[in-house]
Amino acid sequence: MSGDEATEQAPVRVIAAGISVLVVGAVVARLLGALVPWPDPLLLAVVIGVVLANVIGVPEWLEPGIATHKVWLGAGIVLLGASVSVQSLVAAGPVVLALVVAAVCATTLLVEGLARNVFGIRERLSSLLAAGTGICGVSAVVAVAGSIDAKEETIAYAAGTILLFDAVTLAVYPAAGSLLAVPDQVFGVWAGVSMFSTGPVVATGFAHSEAAGQWATLTKLARNALIGGVVLAYAGYYARRGAKTTTSLGTVWTEFPKFVVGFLVLAGIASLGVFTSAQVTAIENAYDWLFLLAFVGLGTELQGDVFRNAGIRPVLVVLVTWAIIASTTLVGLWMLFG
């Protein structure tokens, strides 16, 4: 049973208990963040989640409430729309969008090529790795898996590999950004085009700076919006090869990240000058807390047994691809915006 299904079926008191764990973790992260200069409270929240899952242990009955962390992440991203500079988005939008499309195409094709032709990985696992690396992490793995009739074992291998790199990039990017003194916009777009899952991108961006967090979120949302096209493309490819597929427009909409729409709507409303400065400050405080809740939950997904089961060949494929894309995009972005 998936986290979402478990949440839907669990009693309210059970869900509330799991949410209370996220709240406690978020408060602890905020308090620790006030005491130590680094890392950022958002990264501390992830660490707290990792400790909960791998050291203390999370009882099964708490999992439905903890699984709501995806809801809090989506809500925080929607509220983030109220504080985004629409003028900056419009000015840099075409360039960033072109970079996103180029990065997604390059990443997807590179993973497919390396996995099939160099490492000899079977095609469905190759496709799931490509989708997860190129679009939006585990969400893309699950979405594409449903469209190509992938087996549960294949999904688990792909998801485990992506989660491993979510953990790695959460550590590497903040350190690299600080060591290299990467400018805010460069860092945000870099994280948005080269990291995998939405949660780690947002956490890493805001850990660097407020501006970097906004650019990271904007860029990642642009990548996420491409998930529908990628799902349909893979469904069409495997359908032509005689595979059983069940993808429809309804299925694509079900998997589409709805918070992208909410973010754009609120950004449009904010651009009309509807919100006062005090209201914007209150909204910013609200999404800060929502992100803390979300990242405690995100940390609980980074479990050691998942990483151990990922397998070495998928890891090598993603490692090589990530190293190439991350390095080339950083250099290119620094030349454009630095």
Image (cartoon, helix red, strand yellow):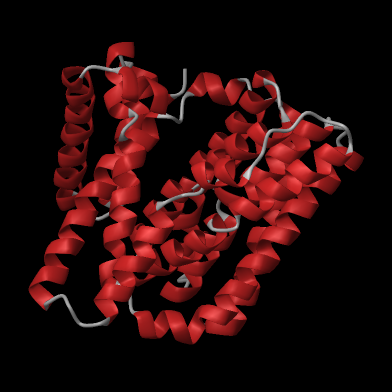
Q: For this view, does 24 lie left or right of residue 321?
A: left
Q: Nearer the viewer, residue 286 or 56?
A: 286
Which residue corresponds to the image point at 56% horizontal and 43% vertical from the top-left?
A: 250
Res 210 seen here? no
Which residue corresponds to the image point at 27% horizontal and 74% vertical from the top-left?
A: 269
- Residue 142 occupies quadrant: top right
Which residue corresponds to the image point at 56% horizontal and 35% vertical from the top-left?
A: 164
Q: How many marks?
A: 0
Q: For this view, does 169 lie left or right of residue 309?
A: left
Residue 137 x %, y %: 56, 43
Q: Nearer the viewer, residue 183 or 96?
A: 96
User: What is the residue that sits farthest to the top in this orientation?
Assistant: 60
Q: Nearer the viewer, residue 80 or 225?
A: 225
Q: Nearer the viewer, residue 139 or 241?
A: 241
Residue 32 x %, y %: 18, 44
Q: Is residue 8 above or below residue 136?
A: above
Q: Is residue 273 above or below residue 58?
A: below
- Residue 13 occupies quadrant: top left
Residue 72 x %, y %: 29, 44
